[in-house]
Image (cartoon, helix red, strand yellow):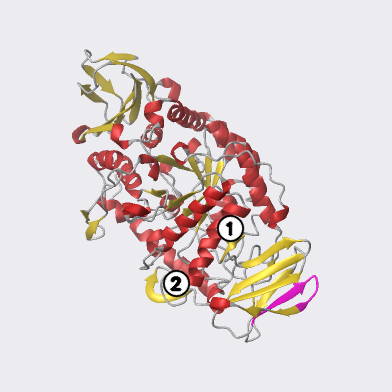
Amino acid sequence: MKVGSQYLGNGVCEFTLWSPLKEKVAVHLVSPEEKLLPMNKQEQGYWYLKAEIEPGTLYYYQLEDGADRPDPASHFQPQGVHQASEIIAHNNTNWQDSQWAGIPLEEMIIYEMHVGTFTPEGTFKAIMPRLSDLAELGVNAIEIMPVAQFSGDRNWGYDGVYPYAVQNSYGRPEDLKQLVDAAHQQGIAIILDVVYNHFGPEGNYIATHAPYFTDTYQTPWGDAINFDDAYSYGARNYFVENALYWLENYHIDGLRLDAIQAIYDSSAKHILQEMAEKVEEFSQQVGRKFCLIAESDLNDVRVICPQELGGYGIDAQWSDDFHHSLRTVLTKESGGYYADFGSCQQLAKAYQNTFVYDWQYSPFRKRYHGNVTGDRQGHQFVVCIQNHDQIGNRMLGERISDLIDFEATKLAAGALLLSPYIPLLFMGQEYGEESPFLYFVSHEDPDLVAAVREGRKKEFTDFHVEGDYIDPQSIEAFETSKLHWQQKNEGKHLILWQLYQKLIAMRRTIPALKKLDKQNLEVTVKESDRIITLHRWQDDSQIFSILNFDDRDIKLENIFPVGKWQKILDSAEPKWMGNGSDLPEKIDTEEQQLSIKSHSFVVYQQ
């Protein structure tokens, strides 16, 4: 059941609203002319109206108490979260991507971006000239942080209150469509970050329409969304249709589902399973694959297991354990959830088994956590060395390159892109952007602003460092977080960009790196020297990598597999602004004595 306004063409529009507890509902047109049109109640509490109305018309739903409320499934809020909704003609788009076949999940190089800070303009249109830069780097999938309408004009996007409407400060619906179309011309897929676990606090009128929430469960944001209680059918339909809406009307290639651990559903068919089924049906109809990627800190493979094995059938999920293991080995941080990590042995396990905590006791959680990934393939896991959360949830918003030196920054890049998983880069990471990425909002309610300030200070406690706290409500927090693109062509920034480009090209062209198969991977670790080796193979292609996480040069003996090996990348070489490498260009297993520079990595090909 599609909800909201659907422009059918030829001046005809239909409206569908789920409001099962109301006795009277009307569509209140307010522009270009005012008119009140009563709706008809149908089965299961859906209200319906079909009328002659043109695109661009502004309207509210008028409830039985006389209150005007924006459409909970509004397609656009041109004047913000409290004002009228606009009818959008999605069937008038002149798409140029009819030949687009998508990017297979296992080939994706994902680049996470925030629309407002990616460019000085902070709009959908302003991203388009940068697409060629990303394509040159080797990026073939952009993950856009949430664009659902939120209050004000600056926000991370997780405070959205209209999941069907694009943020008006970023542009109009047609602007996002143009961006998607342009990305497809460049061979880049678009993944949209969506939030199905809560609504933002300001402009949130959803509960005035229907029982969208249940007090059976509590989330960090209050009552949980009603996926399994009385009247849950309407809330479930609302979100399943939202997923299909982005894929159908905006040609989005996939969705990243935010924090699914806060989605509570004890139904025989979990909402994520239902969503996966409907998206797969849509993929079959269209003739190309659309994917769902879950953010989850549950370490639970049921999320991605096939439904016939009792899973939800989601295509892939994030794995925080890789990030936490690598971060703590590089920075030696131990605050907050980092207390559970810190050894090279754990990082080696993250390479080999994905989850470090696979029903291990977690000192931070004070309970056993996670399960075994088993035969789940590498392309079902997304890993990173930083993302919006891991940067922005720090008081000063420091990026990984602010916390470690240049040699270690290069090592981090190698550690990520040599992994048997889908890599995710956060915008600016590829050239070592020096601006922070801070948390920012622009709420209108003074009490809400005060609550956000206090809440963020508490969140910063675990990762406190010396420095000045920047008010999330301030324009400074937003402006400071914008990228400085000119850095990309300068000094060490250019070198780092070229290193990422080289590593991405290797992943695409070397079969042993391209095949994301954990079964064809052998990992060794020497904790005392903080050395990890990765041996990956596919058919007659073999790669052997050595990663030195120690701040000393380390002597190596008898570590190479049998065969003759040719060096293809060494981060310690002057080409990469290193101090010079002692490792030979060619190696056979008769050579025993080797030395690898501190905070460096090397890749050999057989």
Quarter that holds the C terminus:
top left
Q: How far apart are marks 2 and 1 (CA)?
A: 20 Å
Pointer 2 or 1: first along the chain: 2
Residue 433 visible, this orientation: yes
Classify residue 567 by image quadrant. Answer: top left
For residue 245, the mark is: 1
From the image, give the main secondary structure of the stretch colored magenta.
Answer: strand
* Image location of residue 575, percent across then percent down: 45, 21
Classify residue 364 by image quadrant. Answer: bottom left
Dot 1 alpha-carbon crowd within 10 angstroms: few under 14, some 14 to 19, many 20 or more: some
As drawn, 406 above or below 455 = above
> What residue is shown at x 30% (from left), y 48% (from top)?
333
Amino acid found under the numbered disc labelled 2: Asn
Amino acid found under the numbered disc labelled 1: Tyr
* Image location of residue 213, percent across then percent down: 46, 74
Kindly state the secondary structure of the residue where label 2 is placed.
loop
Quarter that holds the N terminus:
bottom right
What stretch of residues is rendered in magenta? Answer: 25-35
Of residues 342 and 15, the one nearer the viewer is 15
Kindly state the secondary structure of the residue where label 1 is placed.
helix
Of residues 324 and 574, the one nearer the viewer is 324
* Image location of residue 126, percent across then percent down: 66, 46
User: Does 137 sit left or right of 89 as displayed?
Assistant: left
Where is mark 2, residue-wise? 226
Dot 2 alpha-carbon crowd within 10 angstroms: few under 14, some 14 to 19, many 20 or more: many
Question: Does 116 lie within the magenta span?
Answer: no
As drawn, 557 above or below 362 = above
